[in-house]
Image: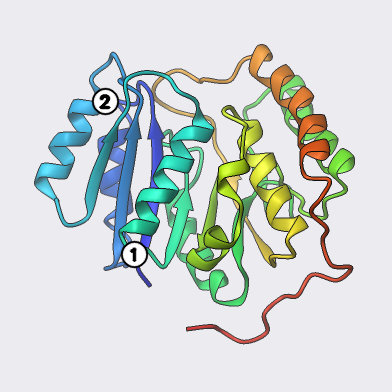
Amino acid sequence: MKLTLIVPTYNEAENLPRLAEALFSLPLPDLRLLIVDDNSPDGTGEIAERLSAQNPAHISVIHRPGKLGLGTAYIQGFEQALLDGAQAIGQMDADFSHPPERILRMVETLQFCDVVIGSRYVPGGSVDRNWPLWRKSLSAFGNFYARTILKLKVRDVTGGFRIWRRETLQGMPLARIRSTGYAFQVETIYVAACLGYAYEEVPIYFADRRWGTSKMSFRIQREAALRVWQILWRYRDLHAPEQPQVHSQPRS
């Protein structure tokens, strides 16, 4: 399976070379890495170019003029990956909060569904054990809040570690996606659910970043919470089937 992993970056100079090394140590000969950099002032874009020059068949870079938002980075990455003929398209962070080794399990699981979610909130999944209680509670509440309002059965609706089938993204109205921040994750999985695409959740351990600075803030979380209601209204014309159809046999 030709898999393209999209990694948006902003000031990830410390993490990006380590991540590339970890990804290409996996037994995935058809893996491609697409880096979408928002003109990082710490030189991440230049590092990405060096990595691409060392491995041009497997690493490519999109340079953007500035911080244009996580959502637009992924949409641009989806479009490029589809043009390049990717059969599966993944999303992941550059900071190792998404464990690269779980990609193998996610790729296997994709044979039986339309999108696979690396989940913190299914049995076997968890968040960083060193997080203080308030941070664990805030993360869990934000996820519960979005799930409840949107009436989603997905356990981890706010996580950004996913692999999509090509056909799934082609069948989604990507031009309608408006969220630019972390609400993008909620919006895309809600649209997929409304259209009846089948999902599976693979448990992951969500570790805190070891290098670099977190992009999360209270303002971002508040914006995401308000955006949930806009998502509910925006897609009122989409209707999910009563029972999602989970594929029982692998698809070629």
Q: Position of residue 75 (x, y in %)?
A: 48, 42
Image: 203 above or below 217: below
Of callouts 2 and 1, which one flags the residue occurring earlier in the amino acid sequence?
A: 2
The answer to whether residue 171 shows anywhere in this view is yes
Residue in the foreground of this view, choosing between 251 and 13: 251
Residue type for callout 2: Thr
Check disc 1: other Cα within 10 Å, few if <14, some if 14-19, many if 20+. Answer: few
Q: Position of residue 62 (x, y in %)?
A: 29, 37
Q: Secondary structure at mark 2?
A: helix
Q: Which residue is mark 2?
A: 44
- In the rendered picture of this protein, how many numbered marks are placed on residues? 2
The answer to whether residue 123 shows anywhere in this view is no
Q: Secondary structure at mark 1?
A: loop
The N terminus, quarter of image:
bottom left
Left-right relation of 18 to 109:
left
Left-right relation of 4 to 127:
left
Image: 102 above or below 141: below
Q: Which residue is mark 1?
A: 85
Judge depth for marks 2 and 1 and give the one in front: 1
Residue type for callout 1: Gly
Q: Do the residues bearing badges 2 and 1 touch, measured as CB atoms within 8 Å?
A: no
Residue at left 34%, top 57%? 83
Q: Position of residue 100 (x, y in %)?
A: 43, 51
Residue at left 32%, top 66%? 28
Residue 243 is labelled as none
Residue at left 13%, top 36%? 50
Q: Position of residue 202 (x, y in %)?
A: 62, 60
Task: Find the distance from the CA under tag 2 to the CA under tag 1.
Answer: 26 Å
Locate residue 135: give its quadrant: top right
